[in-house]
Image (spheres, grey):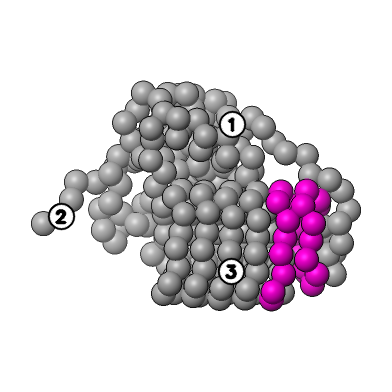
Amino acid sequence: MGHDPTTLVVVGAGGHGRELIDVVEAVNAVCPTYELLGVLDDNEPDPDRLRRRGVRHLGPVRLLAEIDAAYVVGVGAPAVRRAVDSMATNWGRRAATLVHPRAVIGRDVLLGPGSVVCALASITTNVRTGRHVHLNIGATVAHDCQLGNYVTLSPGAHVSGTVTLEDDVTIGTGATVIQGLTVGIGTTVGAGAAVVRSLPAGVVAVGVPARPRAAVIAQQNPADS
């Protein structure tokens, strides 16, 4: 016998939030799993874009305290996902984990609550992720990697084997991290960069090879999308 769909809200109505709606719809096309109630956003989202998706703006993020539903955070900034996760946990809400049917997930992979794996992303074996980790379209993670909480792999980012990405790391579009390295807490690797040496915490690293260029300024507004 089947189970009733899980009620779900997406926090964030910007571009990334609408991409997560795609993931929900793709999952439901294979097996009806979620009843999407709508999106929460402190800002006023583009009504036409939401209307074309058939999705409602339910109101600000604080309404999650009153809505009995699971949630995912459709916001790219790790600091925002962290803030929303903290609030939602205090409200007793459960984070859903989304995997697009066209993603490839190997055996011995453990995805943390709230994690999202988009279409054409790939994870091989013995990989662990923390909470609310996002692998965007076409991102890859090879064997024996550890991804901390709120890590973001942008579209087409590639992480080789036995890499550790600590909490709040962002790997930019098309960037690569070679095997055996560590990227420190809160560091951002710029688009197209090649990380060939471990990177410290709290920097922006760019170029080939990637070198630290600036300190990270964290985004703090949980309504940002």
Q: Where residue 114 appears, x then y in whole percent? A: 46, 48
Mark 3 or mark 2: whose residue is earlier in sequence:
2
Q: In what element is the residue under mark 1? A: loop
Q: Residue furthest left?
A: 1
Q: In what element is the residue under mark 3? A: loop
Q: Which of the image's four quarters has the C terminus? A: top right
Badges 1 and 3: C-beta atoms under 8 Å apart? no
Mark 1 or mark 3: whose residue is earlier in sequence:
3
Amino acid type of the residue that numbered disc 2 sits on in the rendered structure: Gly
Query: Badge 1 local density, few (<14 within 10 Å), some, or many (20+)?
Result: many
Q: Where residue 203 appears, x then y in whole percent? A: 81, 51
Horizontal arrangement in the rendering, residue 3 relative to residue 14 (left or right): left
Horizontal arrangement in the rendering, residue 77 relative to residue 183 (left or right): left
State the separation of the CA atoms marked 3 and 2.
35 Å
Query: Badge 3 local density, few (<14 within 10 Å), some, or many (20+)?
Result: many
- Give the residue pinned by disc 3: 145
